[in-house]
Image (cartoon, rainbow, N blue to C red):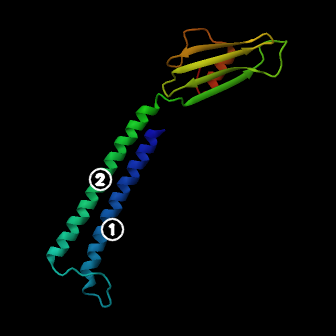
């Protein structure tokens, strides 16, 4: 997801850079015509040195913008790498495993990251107590046999089993 946002941010920044360059060229053309057209309100450059200073200043601004885009791309890449390990996919299934209880108070909860690594936690509620089980999921697979509810929780989390 962040990779797509980084691509979008990079495209927007590149587009802004192109637009700024075009605006610079249009403004320079308008400044040159300004002296020849009656009623022109643009500021005129008194000599070639002031025009050169203006162009150099604009080039420096474009370089700063380019550096900022590079910095944003680096930040986006770092965020994307860090978020791959964050919980991104969640699935929850409530069920009633015993005939003597009601209300579907038992559940299976799947918590997975972008690599399909994480856990499936199951809670079985009965009149005499509650038991909690946790199974590790690595690459979308569990070493232990999963119950139908745990498999359903993994499917709800977006894992194709």
- For the C terminus, give its image quadrant: top right
Q: Residue at x 79, y 10 (%)?
A: 128
Position of 132 compared to 4: left or right? right
Q: Say which residue appears at 41% left-offset and 45% top-offset.
A: 7
Judged left or right of residue 159, residue 5 is left
Residue beneath the point at 50% across and 30% down = 86
Height in image: 158 above or below 59?
Answer: above
Q: Residue at x 29, y 78 (%)?
A: 30
**Is the Cβ of the residue at disc 1 closer than 8 Å to that at disc 2?**
no
Residue 159 in view, yes or no: no
Element under disc 2? helix
Count of numbered marks:
2
- Check disc 2 and report the residue beneath it: 66
Residue 145, picture quadrant: top right
Badge 2 density bin: few <14, some 14–19, many ≥20, Cα 10 Å: some
Whichever of callouts 1 and 2 sits on the residue coming sooner in the sequence is 1
Residue 38 percent coordinates (x, y): 30, 91
Q: Which residue is mark 1?
A: 23
Q: Is residue 11 visible?
A: yes
- Quadrant hosting residue 94: top right
Looking at the picture, does residue 108 appear above or below residue 45? above
Q: Nearer the viewer, residue 33 or 150?
A: 150
Residue 28 drawn above or below residue 1: below
The secondary element bearing badge 1 is classed as helix
Q: In the drawing, does residue 141 fall left or right of residue 71?
A: right
Q: Could you classify mark 1 by the number of other residues whose Cα lies within 10 Å: few (under 14), some (14-19), or many (20 or more)?
A: few
């Amino acid at each position: 997801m962040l990779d797509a946002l980084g691509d979008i941010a990079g495209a927007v920044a590149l587009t802004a850079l192109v637009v700024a360059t075009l605006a610079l060229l249009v403004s320079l053309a308008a400044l040159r015509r300004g002296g020849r057209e009656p009623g022109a309100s643009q500021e005129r450059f008194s000599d070639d040195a002031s025009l050169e200073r203006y162009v150099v200043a604009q080039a420096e601004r474009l370089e700063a913008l380019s550096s900022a885009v590079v910095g944003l791309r680096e930040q986006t890449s770092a965020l994307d790498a860090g978020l791959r390990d964050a919980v991104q996919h969640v699935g929850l299934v409530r069920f009633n495993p015993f005939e003597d209880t009601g209300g579907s108070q038992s559940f299976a909860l799947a918590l997975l990251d972008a690599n399909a690594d994480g856990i499936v936690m199951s809670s079985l509620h009965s009149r005499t107590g509650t038991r909690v089980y946790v199974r590790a999921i690595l690459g979308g697979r569990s070493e232990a046999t999963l119950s139908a509810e745990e498999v359903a929780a993994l499917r709800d989390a977006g894992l194709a089993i």
